[in-house]
Amino acid sequence: MARKVLCVVGTRPNLVKVAAVLRAFAAQAAAGTGRLTPVLVDTGQHYDEALSGRFYADLHLPPPDYRLGVGSGSHAATTAAVIRGLEPVLLAERPDLVLVFGDVNSTVAAALTAAKTGVRLAHVEAGLRCFDRRVPEEVNRVVTDALAELLFVTEAAAVDNLRREGREATDIHLVGNVMIDSLLWALPQAGSSRVLERLGLAGDRDLAILTVHRAGNVDAPAPLAAILGAAAELAGELPVILPVHPRTRARIREWGLSGFVCEPGAPPRSRVLVSEPLGYLDFVHLLARARLVLTDSGGVQDETTVLGTPCLVLRDHSERPVTLTTGTSVLVGRDRQRILAGAHAALRRAGVGERPPPPLWDGRAGERIARVLAEHL
Ligand code: UD1
Ligand code: UDP
């Protein structure tokens, strides 16, 4: 009998992750090895074309079956709006399982709604911990994992975290990383992206990418000024591209930091070149080409690990330790001198050399999730 799996997404990284799972469900059905019928619910936490619609197109996602349209708000307001919007959907659909991804507010809200309506819950990217409850995503991770009966895990440290929290080994499935499934799927197509021409950088051999949107980096002027200051100094040596999250763009304006950045077309000497947030294929193209990435994104740390691109993590800790131990990530915090020292050290090295990716980061995590779900349901 077909089983109904209701997948809840709300933000850009959720779309990258769910795409891998939906592809795996379709492949499983085509092979006759399982019948998992997906229902896709988009909460609308991200709604701009550049953060949402573009990703449906780039990742060949079907339109969602339900759009909750929650929009932006405080943490409590967003979480509450998802719960209110999702409850009637769960009551009408009566899925066999709710599947949630990552650590955003839509994730924890969907987890709570599943628990309150008595629907079984599985979490993709479970067990990651930075051990700092001031980080909003950490609260989302801990609560979601506590409510999920099936925990799909990307790396061994996450298994250890969950075991330490008292979870049974049978609840935990080390399946690999769905973000890497999508990356490996996208790479061949990303090769033909014309993003560098659009940014006026077609002639540049070397470039660096900066992404920054985490609360700890953009909700106060000092860390954002330090990061942009370091990046602008680095831009004296090679072009630094900032595909800017709308939250960060607003803060740059609000805090008078516009002098550190310039728009495409302006002479970029010692200024960071800002663009709109890039579509997935364009961004993957840049990641694969970059000499250096500076980021506070979780997903980008995973991607640079597999691509072998040096990655300076603009945070004091990472919930993804494998990206530090076997990957290319180095923690540099938000101190201008530390960022610059890290950047120069990375640029001095000719390359990071061939490194095997973390175990099971092989493009087949979605397939493993589909297999576990088919067995479990
Ligand atoms: C959210 C996640 C973060 C994740 C990121 C992925 C939480 C707590 N944070 O952060 O973990 O890394 O998504 O990108 O869930 N905005 C727009 N257009 C949009 C969406 C947002 O302009 O389409 C602006 C609004 O001003 C909004 C602000 O960005 O208030 C923040 O949006 P929100 O979804 O709350 O958090 P993100 O910073 O996107
Ligand atoms: N990404 C993208 N365009 C951009 C910035 C990021 O396509 O301009 C992709 C990136 O490749 C990764 C995902 O978005 O797959 C990461 O999302 P984000 O950094 O917003 O969230 P996080 O992973 O930190 O939760």
Image (cartoon, rainbow, N blue to C red):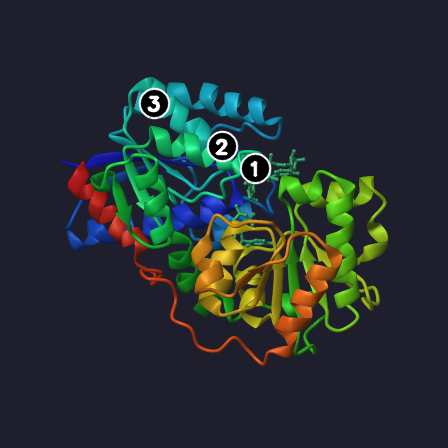
- Position of 85 with respect to 342 (left or right) is left
* Residue picked out by circle 2: 139
Ligand 1 lies in quarter:
top right
On the rendered image, what quadrant is the N terminus found in?
top left
Provide the secondary structure element on which disc 3 rests. helix
Circle 1 packing at 10 Å, graded few (<14), some (14-19), many (20+), is: few
* Residue picked out by circle 1: 135
x and y, in percent, of residue 336 in the image: 75, 57
Disc 3 residue: CB within 8 Å of ligand 1: no
Q: Is residue 42 visible?
A: no
Q: Is residue 109 above or below residue 7?
A: above
Kind of residue indicated by mark 2: Val
Single out the mark in the foreground, 3 or 2: 2
- Position of 349 with respect to 163 (left or right) is right
* Residue picked out by circle 3: 115
- Marks 3 and 1, the one that precedes in the sequence: 3
- Position of 206 with respect to 28 (left or right) is right
| Front in this rendered view, residue 172 or 273 | 172
Circle 2 packing at 10 Å, graded few (<14), some (14-19), many (20+), is: some
- Marks 3 and 2, the one that precedes in the sequence: 3
Residue visible at 58% across and 66% down in the picture: 286
Kind of residue indicated by mark 3: Ala
Q: Are dots 2 and 1 in contact, CB under 8 Å?
A: yes
| Front in this rendered view, residue 63 or 4 | 4
